[in-house]
Amino acid sequence: MDLKKIFLKDACPTSIGGQAIMEGIMMRGPKKTAIAVRLPDGTIHMKTQPSPKTGKWTKVPLVRGVVSFVTSLVEGTRTLLYSADILEENYPEEYEKDKFDIWVEEKFGKERAWKILMMLSVVVALVLSIGIFMLLPTVVVGLLSKVTESIILLNLAEGAMRLVIFIMYIALIGRMQDIKVVFQYHGAEHKTIHCFENGLELTPENAQQFYTLHPRCGTSFLMFVMVIAVLAHALMGWPNVWMRILTRLLVLPLIAGVSYELLKWAGRSDNWLVKTLSLPGIYLQKLTTREPDDSQLEVAIAALKAVLPDNDTPYFEGLCDINGEPLKEERDNNEEGKEGNESTT
């Protein structure tokens, strides 16, 4: 692995970021967000909408990391559910609703049901993440306190167990076919952003020359969180299990804030210290990304172009297909400026 192809010296870092979704990509720019989903007939369903407005807290160091984490979790879940809905409409025989989904829709209506399911998804994700990756390791490693009283050893063991659980989780879900495809789109997102940041024409051929690894990836953020947590927890000693659980939850926002600042620094610098700190996250991305094919890169490119402010169109700007031809745009005049615009090409 050549780090010079990841921390590209002549690259111009951008604030544009993305997320792999079901059969597609979400790209978020400073003013617009685009969701591109590949449909079974080969066309790309595109939705563009204004990006969420940033408040004053997003400019405060450390605090903005926590705000960004929570916002990304909520919006990311919303986007995943939206892509699932699009696929359900176009693959009805493969995406049948289960009894719970049907019951919620009948009870609350389709729109409210969608919001309820999104909230439940966020809550379940938070509970599982905190329970499995934060609380379980400290409870299990607490048994070692009967063998050693070394605070450093206990905290290192807790951090190591947390890391092992996370890597095993990623490795296991990565064996699922649907997740493999998501990881391919994750790789397509990174290659496309690399291509854009290096000033090359956005084509699959140009994007394919880059790695699927990127220093600003959310996977690196999670690795920063786990590494910094070990250092922070070591300073808090090794109290009883309930106090450990409480203190680890209370310090989590601070750890997330510091990790976010490190990630932003890694995204705009290529010095040796940044490379050293970023290496664990870079290697972890080898599990969360796969080499995409050209059709998946086309989706990522379409999503990236959709958020570029290159003309005066309010929310749908400069989007072309892979041959450079303008995409056909279908607008809902009643929803314009609210939910965004959708099109299929």
Image (spheres, rainbow, N blue to C red):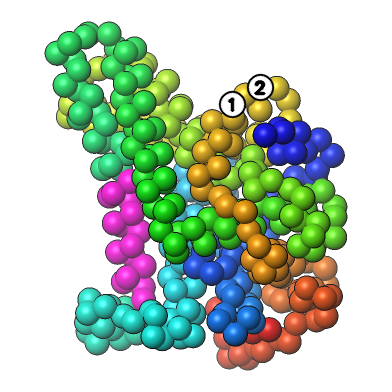
- Residues 328 and 147: in front is 147
- Disc 1 element: helix
Mark pair 1, 2: CA separation: 6 Å
Answer above or below: position of 332 versus 9. below
Residue at x 78%, y 66% (from the top left corner): 309
Answer above or below: position of 62 versus 57. above
- Residues 62 and 255: in front is 255
Magenta span covers which residues? 114-129
Q: In the rendered image, which residue does mark 2 sit on?
A: 273
19 left or right of 233?
Answer: right
Residue at x 16%, y 21% (from the top left corner): 143
202 left or right of 73?
Answer: right
Q: Check residue 118 for magenta coloring.
A: yes
Asked if the residues shown at circle 1 and circle 2 are in contact, with their CB atoms under 8 angstroms apart, the answer is yes
Residue at x 64%, y 66% (from the top left corner): 296
Is residue 109 at all visible to an observer of this figure?
yes
Image coordinates for residue 52, horizontal then vertical, percent:
57, 63
Label 1 is placed on what type of residue? Leu
Image coordinates for residue 204, horizontal then vertical, percent:
76, 62
Q: Main secondary structure of the magenta part?
A: helix
Local packing at callout 1 (Cα closer than 10 Å; few below 14, some 14-19, many 20+) is some
- Residues 343 and 206: in front is 206
Answer above or below: position of 321 versus 278. below
Image coordinates for residue 264, horizontal then vertical, percent:
63, 39
Label 2 is placed on what type of residue? Leu
192 left or right of 142?
Answer: right
Is residue 193 at all visible to an observer of this figure?
no
Residue at x 28%, y 17% (from the top left corner): 154
- Disc 2 element: helix
Q: In the rendered image, which residue does mark 1 sit on?
A: 277
The N terminus - image quarter: top right
